[in-house]
Image (cartoon, rainbow, N blue to C red):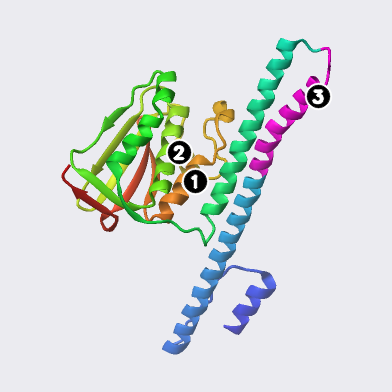
Amino acid sequence: MTKQLQERHIKQTTKKINLRFYDKDFERLAEEINYEIDATKKAIADQKRTENELKQAISNMSHDIRTPMTSILGYMQFLEDETIPPHTRQEYMLIVKSSALRLKVLLEDFFELSVIESTDYLLKMEWVQLNDLILEVLVSFYEAFNQQQIEPTIHMPEEMIRVKADPSALKRVIENLVTNALKHSTGHVTITLHHTPAYTELIISNPAPRLQKQDLFHLFDRFYKADQARKGKGTGLGLSIAKSLMEKMNGNLSAELHDQQLLMKCQWHVSTQKTSNL
């Protein structure tokens, strides 16, 4: 066993301890050593993955910040030219304003995500009437649906469904999912709320013909944008924020793809749901 451990240290091998000896105590010792070897390998892999995710997040954030900043600085230089006609100056001012607003949204989303993922971020958990909250959010998106000529299909149960959550955080989750559906939908948007004795589920779905199965593994990554053709349409942080908030509220947010239809599923298990008649 000593020789094998020395080989691991000297040769940097990942081979586990191999012991064939008719002594249960030595065998148990070998099992514990192998358990520690597995735990160390997993910790190293997790650390590398976290480092890579952080590097990618910083790289993506730097790129997303640089784009509006470059636009702002470029058009500000144009505006310094006193010979520019008034209508052109107004056009440049609108571009600068649009870029500044995009930069503001990006920084606010990144700050919000960092706050949400901090260990001292606290939520005010209470029973929330999910039916009413969903309708409240959809009403606030009335103009956005109209602009895209989309009439959402809504499936709601007659009984009132309550879940244990932070009202403000849950509202943000639904808003982010509806925003994502509107940005990437090529047709209709469907909102379905249903419950079983085991769980309550909210599904927001939309057509996503450009989405691939492999994209599902990264949809909730920071700054990830599956549809690169719409790269300028958002910060890529909305789904990360939604998933972090759901996990903070003891719920789950997942994504599925069926027949080119993207389904975003918010799920609460029986301990966090309650129903009553309207």
Location of residue 159 by image quarter: top left
Q: Residue at x 40, y 43 (%)?
A: 171
Image label count: 3
Q: Are marks 2 and 1 in contact (CB under 8 Å)?
A: yes
Query: What residue did someone put label 1 on?
Result: 241
Query: What residue did someone put label 2 on?
Result: 176
Q: Are marks 3 and 1 in contact (CB under 8 Å)?
A: no
Q: Please tell me how crowded label 2 is: few (under 14), some (14-19), or many (20+) other residues with Cα within 10 Å.
A: some
Quadrant in the picture for the N terminus? bottom right
Between circles 3 and 1, the one closer to the viewer is 3
Q: Residue at x 49, y 46 (%)?
A: 241
Q: Looking at numbered disc 3 in the image, what kind of residue is underneath it?
A: Gln
Q: Looking at numbered disc 2 in the image, what kind of residue is underneath it?
A: Asn
Q: Secondary structure at mark 1?
A: helix
Looking at the picture, how far across and down is residue 176, in whole percent? 45, 38
Task: State which region is magenta.
Answer: 59-83
Q: Is residue 261 visible?
A: no
Q: Secondary structure at mark 3?
A: helix
Between circles 2 and 3, the one closer to the viewer is 3
Q: Is residue 72 visible?
A: yes
- Spatial distance from mark 3 to mark 1, Cα to Cα? 36 Å
| Disc with the residue nearer the chain's start (3 vs 1) | 3
Query: What residue did someone put label 3 on?
Result: 77
In the displayed structure, 248 sits above or below 191; it is: below
Taking the image as shown, residue 34 lies to the left or right of residue 63, namely: left
